[in-house]
């Protein structure tokens, strides 16, 4: 049993364009931007960690002054909740 394919049902070949120098430069810029973002994030995390260590918030909480620790914890939870809500609101439509 053989069937004839009509003109509308045949598979089409993909037309691939060669990569131009413009596409390469755009890819290089995107790669460099991503690397710069990763490095700046690492620097920011390091700076915040050093700041937390110098502030000695955990040490103050251990000595009986829990006010600053509670305040820092509430602010951190508020920021985390805001980020979670934004991630939930911006998710891709299905």
Image (spheres, rainbow, N blue to C red):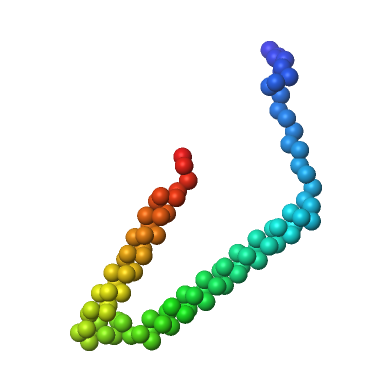
State the residue at coordinates (65%, 66%): 32
- Please identify the residue farthest to the left as the structure is shown: 64
Does 83 sit above or below residue 64? above
Question: Residue 6 location in percent, x, y?
Answer: 72, 17
Q: Nearer the viewer, residue 79 or 14?
A: 79
Number of callouts: 0
Question: Residue 71 location in percent, x, y?
Answer: 27, 74
Q: Quadrant of residue 59?
A: bottom left
Does 44 sit above or below residue 6? below
Question: Residue 38 location in percent, x, y?
Answer: 56, 69
Which quarter of the rendering shows the N terminus?
A: top right
Q: Is residue 78 left or right of residue 64?
A: right
Q: Nearer the viewer, residue 35 or 83?
A: 83
State the residue at coordinates (32%, 66%): 77
Question: Residue 74 location in percent, x, y?
Answer: 28, 69
Does 19 sit above or below residue 14? below
State the residue at coordinates (41%, 82%): 51
Q: Is residue 16 left or right of residue 31?
A: right
């Amino acid at each position: 049993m053989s069937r004839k394919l009509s003109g509308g049902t045949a598979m089409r070949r993909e037309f691939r364009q060669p990569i131009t120098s413009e596409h390469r430069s755009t890819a290089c810029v995107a790669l460099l931007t991503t690397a710069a973002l990763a490095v700046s994030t690492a620097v920011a995390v390091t700076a915040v960690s050093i700041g937390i260590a110098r502030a000695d918030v955990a040490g103050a909480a251990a000595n009986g002054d829990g006010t600053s620790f509670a305040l820092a914890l509430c602010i951190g939870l508020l920021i985390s909740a805001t980020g979670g809500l934004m991630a939930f609101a911006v998710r891709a439509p299905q």
